[in-house]
Amino acid sequence: MSERIEALLRIPLAILYGAIVGVWGLIVGIATIFHWFHTIILGRRHRGIAEFVNRYVAYLYTVYRYLWSTTNKRPWPIGEMGPSKLHHVDMKQ
């Protein structure tokens, strides 16, 4: 695909990615508050919530890289790399 078409395609994809990031970000915000209370009360992080938030941050990074034209690799759901392939959490801290 030519660079011109790829650049024009980013406009409608920005709407799609914005909706995904917006909804997922709202859920991550709620999960972060719950995670904070979990950490304060139990004294340890919840692995599932930490991985979920980490996937969101990694996905957000890949979306920004695509929309700011630093790469032509499209993020999920149009591209190949889905959110499950984006994370690595080190829980040994």
Image (spheres, grey):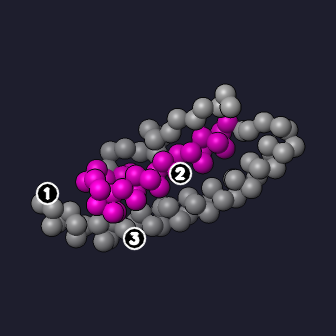
Disc 1 versus disc 3: distance between alpha carbons?
21 Å
Q: Position of residue 56 (x, y in %)?
A: 53, 51
As helix, strand or loop, the secondary structure at mark 2 comes to helix
| Residue farthest to the right, as pictured | 41
The residue singled out by tag 2 in the image is 56
Q: Which residues are magenta?
A: 47-76
Residue drawn at x 72%, y 38% as measured from the top left: 46
Residue 1: give its label. 1
Residue drawn at x 68%, y 31% as measured from the top left: 93
Q: Is residue 17 left or right of residue 74?
A: right
Residue 46: give its label. none
As helix, strand or loop, the secondary structure at mark 1 comes to loop
Q: Position of residue 11 (x, y in %)?
A: 30, 71
Q: Residues within 10 Å of mark 3 (few under 14, many from 20)?
A: few
Q: Main secondary structure of the magenta part?
A: helix
Q: Position of residue 86 (x, y in %)?
A: 46, 41
The residue under label 1 is which amino acid type?
Answer: Met
Q: Quadrant of residue 54?
A: top right
For the residue pair 91 and 30, the one nearer the viewer reads as: 91
Which image quadrant: the N terminus? bottom left
**Is 86 contained in the magenta span?**
no
The residue singled out by tag 3 in the image is 15
Instruction: Give the foreground label among 3 and 2.
Output: 2
The reply to whether discs 3 and 2 touch (Cβ–Cβ < 8 Å) is no
Q: Is residue 25 left or right of residue 86?
A: right
Disc 3 versus disc 2: distance between alpha carbons?
17 Å
Sequence-first disc among 1 and 3: 1
Residue 78 seen anywhere in this rendered image of the structure: no
As helix, strand or loop, the secondary structure at mark 3 comes to helix
Query: Compared with residue 84, is residue 66 higher up or lower down, i.e. above or below?
Result: below
The residue under label 3 is which amino acid type?
Answer: Ile
**Is 64 contained in the magenta span?**
yes
